[in-house]
Image (cartoon, rainbow, N blue to C red):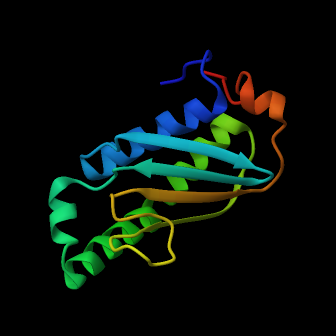
Amino acid sequence: MNQPDLTMAQQVAQAVSEFQHQRTGYAPKAVTVVLAAETLVVTLHEALSPAERSLALTPEGAAQVQEFHRQLFKSSADLLRAEIKRITGVAVGEAAAEIETTTGAVVHAFASGTMVQVFQLAGPISAQAWNGSAVGDSP
């Protein structure tokens, strides 16, 4: 759903949350979106379901949860890329997502079930456009 009174960041957060819920049946508790130059970082807080958190308590289970989310993102990243382009008006060049199920590893998410998605945009977005109305607000 397109809501023109939301900032681009809020629209991206909403789109990613809905995407996660549609793909896994479990919505993250919160989504944080940060734009730094041409890098868009999306953090899904508490993105793992209770079953996934339980499975991730063993090394084998953690590997299964990580691989599931890697494959899920890989198979459907084009949909997120298209939605980000629609919202921001800028294409996504690179995209990556990783989930961390044990503490201390250097990956994009943490044991609390946080997931981080990083999108490298093909061009800049002005601060005015990012904090104001979206360029991709056409119905």
Q: Residue at x 50, y 58 (%)?
A: 116
Of the pair 82 and 53, the residue shown nearer to us? 53
Q: Is residue 123 toward the left or the right of residue 59 in the image?
A: right
Work out which residue is located at the far top of the displayed protein and give it.
5
In the shown orientation, is residue 135 left or right of residue 74? right
**Residue 123: image x %, image y %?**
83, 51
Which x, y percent locates residue 31?
Answer: 47, 42
Q: Residue furthest front?
A: 104
In the image, residue 90 sits, relative to residue 127, either above or below, namely: below
Q: Residue at x 59, y 47 (%)?
A: 82
- Locate the C terminus by quadrant: top right
| Residue 135 at least partly seen | no
37 horizontally vs 35: left or right: right
Please, is residue 2 above or below residue 97 in the view?
above
Residue 88 percent coordinates (x, y): 70, 38
Q: Horizontally, is 59 left or right of 10 in the view? A: left
Rendered residue at 84%/36% (across/down): 126
Hey, which quadrant is residue 54 in on the image? bottom left
Q: Residue at x 66, y 24 (%)?
A: 137
Answer with the quarter of the image where residue 133 lies: top right
Across and down, in percent, residue 12 comes to 56, 38
Label total for image = 0
Instruction: Choose between 34 and 77: the one closer to the eye.
Output: 34
| Viewer-closest of 128 and 1 | 128
Q: Is residue 52 visible?
A: yes
Q: Is residue 55 above or below residue 89?
A: below
